[in-house]
Amino acid sequence: MSKPTADWEKVGDRFYRKTQLYTDVFDQDLELENYVIAGAPYSGAVALYRDEDKLHAYRGTQTAKPTIDIFSCAGKLIRSLNIDKGIVKALGWSEDETLLVVTNDGTVRCYHNLQNDFTPFTLGHGAEEHGVRACRFWLSGFVALLNNNALIAVTRYDEPRPKLLATPPSGDVASWAIIPPAYTLSRSVEVLLATGKTIYVVDASECEDRMLENGPFKHIAVSPNGNFIALYTDDSRVWVISSDFQNRLSEYNSRVKTPPKDMQWCGNNAVVLAWEDEVHMVGPNGAASKYFYDSWVHLIADTDGIRIITNDICEFLQKVPDASEETFRLGSTSPASVLIDAVDLLEKKSPKADDNIQLIRPNLDEAVDTCVKAAGQEYSIHWQKQLLKAASYGKSVLDLFNSDDFVDMCETLRVLNAVRFYEIGLPLSYEQYMRLTPERLIQRLVNRQEYLLALKVSDFLRLPLNKIYVHWARQKVRSSNADEESICKDIVHRLDGKRGISFEEIARAAYDEGRSKLAIELLNNEPRAGKQVPLLLSVGEESLALDKAIESGDTDLVFYVLLHLKKKLTLANFFRTINTRSMATALVEASAAYGDRELLKDLYYQDDRRLDGSNLLLTEALKQSDSQHRNDKLKLASKLLQDSREHTFQVKAIDESQRLLRIQEVFEKDLGESFVGLSVNETIYKLIKSGNIKRSQKVQSEFKVAEKTYWWIRLCALVSRRDWRELEEMSKTRKSPIGWEPFFNEILGAGNAKLASLYIPKCTSLTVPERIEMWIKCGLITKGAEEALKAKDISSLEMLKNKATGNAVHEIERMMAQLAPSRR
Amino acid sequence: MAASQASQAINTQDITDKSRRDLLLLLEAVRGKKNLVIEKSLASIIGLFVKFSTLQEYGVDKLFFLENHNVDSSQRNIVFLARGENARVVRTVAGTYDNCTMIWHRINSITSQISIASLTEAEQIRLVRSESKIDHDFTVIWVPRRTLVSNLVLEEHGVLGEANITELDLQFVPLEPDVLSLELEDCFSDLILRKDPTPIFAAARSLMGLQKQHGLFPRILGKGDNAKKLADLLLRMRSEEDVNASSDPSNTYLTSFGLTPSSTIENLIIIDREVDFPTALATQLTYEGLLDEVFSVSHNQAEVDSSILGSAPAPSTQPQNGTSPAPITATKRKVQLDSSDKLYPEIRNVNFATIGPLLNRTAKRLQSDQQNIHAPNQSISDLKSFVSKLPSYQAEQASLKIHTSLAEEISKFTKAETFRRVLEVEQTLLIGSEGSTVHENIEELIARDTPLPTVLRLLCLESTLSNGIRLRELDNFKRQILQAYGYQHLLTLTSLQKMGLLVPREANRGYLNPIAGSAGMGATDWNFVRQRLQLWVDEVEDETGKDKDIAYVFSGYAPLSVRLVQAVLQKSYLQTLATAGGAAVAPATTGAGWKGFDDVLARIKGATVDVVQKGSDADASHARKTLRGNKEGPKTTIVFFVGGVTFAEIAALRFVGEQLKEAGGRQLVMATTGIISGKRVADVAIEKGTFGS
């Protein structure tokens, strides 16, 4: 076994290591120099696209069609995407391995999950006229540079909103780079444009000149943490400065005449320059190291290092992690390195192993931790084992030790080793895995259709499995040639009893493939109506969709379907569909009542709901201010109901209302006052109040208003008119249908106690005490006393006496005296 | 009293906090200052849990009502807050008047305004500068969720791409610690008149939210067709939730095992308003109920003429929620009616007849307190303890003043002769005695031009209690109503018939209305139910003058809805009451659910619901039980009213809750789609337009 330090190299005072990940990456025929290459973050897939600017050998018509090929890091072709229109100007990846393809007319295609289908959007802001020149991507967005130097930023891909940044000065842009929004002070993306001798910093609101004088800069690169900027000057020097342009940190002279093809950061502390087959790595303080290759080199920067890809090999260049350095550095005397020696000795069954342990006894826990950490950084399985063995040995000596980290690391390494296998081709470093998260790793596996591994890893890490199943089923629907029934059966059988399976997603895949029948069949297994409905609509199963929507009880869904139906069907068919479904009818009715009366009319007509139809006309009549139109509407309303026997009351009422309106119009003409809008009773009231008794009686007889009602109205009207004379007249009438008590109450309420008292004797139906009470209310205590006297009620008399004043007291006493003897 | 009921199982404060947090988070997401355009009905609801000053802290500059069409463009950010779910609001199948278009109109008008403004600006300032200033950021917050229909409409108008669209999942709003409400204003008309089940769905979603938090309701009981629909929806949502939860990436392991029955909640009792119309129609006689009858309490606030309250503005009556910054007209003042008041919780639930002595007692106590200060020989420490009590003392005094004036105003109302008549008719009907005086009285009320809602309530009460009115008599009444109040009320009467409130006796099986007569009993056998459940109690007070039965809230009538709840929770009490009442009753049975009262339920219209929910995974539910087992708190029962609850019923249920708490530490929480009263019921049906208007 080679030493772990074999591929280390000292640059300045730091160690860097170059790990060979895979060999025989690309076909030897592939002329890598003619391709544009883009690698997904966290050791993701690599997209290759033939560079249109470069000449290439003619290879027959077949390959002339431009494609974007997606490879794994080990060179396995995952997918080949056809680009049928537009010239590809930029390729990029997002954090979740979505491939973004930007063409020169400003169209952006997002290829999700390494699939063939994409969602497009356009940049706008003049991208179409001026054309896109280049793009720079970060984890969740990108900036496009147009040929007129305009900059357009897109910050999210689920609902993209291209935004124009501040306008930079015109002039040739020698090179440019971006600082992702997460690392800027303004929290908006910042663009560095090398124009002329200086650099401009552009963000959403302003464009600032940084006043440099050593340009033009051939390359600009921003470190992954956004703190440093590397510049490549015209006189072949590399400058590293802080991103606020305040400090120059280091300088390196490459002494190469031709400017490098590419310049990228390797982690946050080294810059890598690449010529055709030569790579310079510039560490801190200008120290450098050179590597030479046999063929064309491409650089793919990642968060903690850089991938170097040639036709033959895929390598990972990174700074040696601290834990590894501590453990393996030559001559290291750190506890961890002693521990690893100890385990070596132990294997040789040497007693010195224990001496070593005793030597580092005080720092043993630290040594174990370091070994565990270093194991995570190792690519070689041998050394991983060795380090873990050391850790295990070390912790067996310790009395108290929390083994969680150890166990976690073992699990993690199992997963990492599994996915690093060349057939999977995901050479994740430990740090990348931590940033990627296990869930997204599963997603990547699923995207590569490694279902078995995905299931095993999920199971191993105790993650939910449902998404993997769904993805599998979708893929099956897409690719299987079997007949629909057996596919459906197979899928349902396989997924039976699994929790949380979204059949809707599977059905949608089937629908997208044009297999509508299969889609419907699969949808039957979907428990969530909200998910079924939209797809059923697109399949064209409207009535089924309506049923499902109603079943769900979600009126929003029902409305959604109804809107859809109404657009699609003729009115008659629309009504027929909703007719049998009462909830749908109710909803249409409710909503139409506020907007579309015509629709409602048609609906009622179709259903032969005459009462509703007539009522609708009635509402319209209410809205008419013109009497002619109003009458027409009312006539229509009554005509609609004429034939049916059960609505005679309604018809009569409508006719009466017309009569009333006619009479009221006559009154308006005759009396010059407004009557329309009043009810029958109110009309009578108003007539009496204005002294038109005759007319009021006519209305009474015309509308057969009950005598009682009429008397009440008359009483109230007269009282409000303060027509005491007329009321006095009325008191002479022999009989009243409403009795006389109301007269008393109303008149007294109006404040005329004298008149009110006239009615007291007429209230013969009341008891004596009640009448006495009435007298008191009128302030006529003597009268009350007389009443009491008649009834021979001595106690009331006494009560009255207490209330009385002045002369009345004597009066009452006299009465009491009258009573007294008779009692004796 | 009510405030101290703060239940442990369902902490309503949490719900308030969550709503507030959610809203503020959404507002915070819009950077910088913003103008808020809000739907009117939402404004007061939001006022229940967040103050205007808090909104201002979160960058809200000005508030506009969506309905007023007057937003200005002073701020770059404009946030719309509107309901997206109600079918009536998003009336798009046919109409164009809806929130979406409203918002679209507004957005358009704003952009056009701006472009004009920018043109003039452009002449003065540099072009580049002004152009970058044009673009407004629009945010639309849909309550309670972003719907497909709203998406569709916004898309049709081409706004979808321009606006940021988010949703605020506003569900229950706690009116009080023991009352949760969805505050759906149109819920009653939606459900009963238009047969639009949107409120049921909203209710199911909210209850599902509770289940997600507290575990499944172990038993769902209910009465009425809508209750059945709600229970079915809950079951359905549970199965959907299974899929949703596990496909949601943000979920943790725990939820992926599915829901398990709650250990703190005992029952969910769903009462459909349709089962018990009479209670909603009868005049409420508790203080709070009468406040509602006279002043209309909405969202815990009543608008009262300031002349009634007297001139001095007391601190507690100042509009506490600033969401309505529009100056309140000088003559109207808002009175906050909730448990934050010193006095109100004590008096809200009592029968109005006893309010006088109660206020009197309080006044005396306050007076004696006051005299204590004036006592000459006080030590400094006495003084100190008094001064520390001073603020609360003053608040109490202020609230006493308010409630005294309110009670005075109410007593003016109750002393009126018509009120006595109305009450007489009501009580006769509720007792169930046949009397011809009822019709005479109603006729007189019509002739005397008593407000239409009052008359309609009486007629509907009769109709619902005796399953319709004889056709000849009904036609007679109808004719009188039309003549007295106008022929436009033909529409009112049809609406009432559609709602099943005022029907001829033959036609009450719902054949005129294809939707209603689908399942369950068509009509309630009131005589049987009245006797079996003792809906009328002659003596509501015991010897000491304390109320002994829920019937006190209507001075004799015990609401059917509450009796149904008692049939689940207080079986033995109800049995003894019935036996004492002389009804032949099977021996008292114990047991869960409706057991022991199946015979009555069979004679009440509407479907009966009784579902036991078990966890899908027995092991997990067992594990959860053992995990929480040591925390065996009081069991809570949730009573949910579909279609609204009256204040009188709330008072009655609180009464039941008190008894339960004393007996076995069980608790009641009320939940509803909204607050209802007879006035609101009648208002739903009444046609507002008149001829010639």
Image (cartoon, coloured by chain):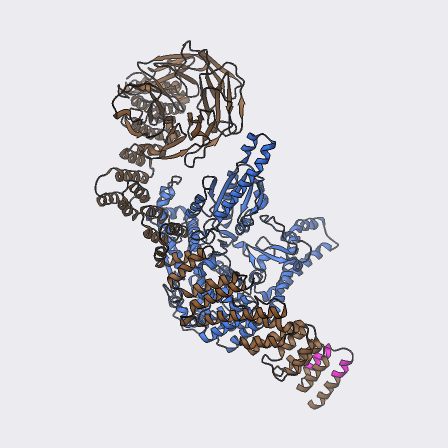
Question: Could you say where residue A647 lies in the image, as x and y percent from the top left?
Answer: 43, 70
Question: Could you say where residue B292 lies in the image, as x and y percent from the top left?
Answer: 56, 61
Chain letter corresponding to the colour blue: B
Quadrant of the drawing holding the N terminus of chain A: top left
Q: Say whether residue B481 is visible.
A: no
Side (left or right) of A49 relative to B306? left
- The answer to which quarter of the image holds residue B407 is bottom right
Task: Determine the residue located farthest toward the right in the rendered image.
Answer: A806
**Residue numbers of the magenta segment:** A796-812
Picture mark count:
0
Q: Is residue A808 one of those drawn in magenta?
A: yes
Question: Could you say where residue B302 lies in the image, as x and y percent from the top left?
Answer: 59, 57
Depth order, front residue of B41/B414: B41
Rendered position, B383 above or below A113: below
Chain letter corresponding to the colour brown: A
Rendered position, B120 above or below B192: above
Q: Is residue A386 one of those drawn in magenta?
A: no
Task: Residue at 39% x, 40% y: name it.
Answer: B252
Task: Residue at 65% x, 80% y: name it.
Answer: A730
Rendered position, A20 above or below B353: above
Side (left or right) of B358 relative to A501? right
Depth order, front residue of B439/A4: B439
Q: Overall secondary structure of the magenta stretch?
A: helix
Depth order, front residue of B374/B11: B11
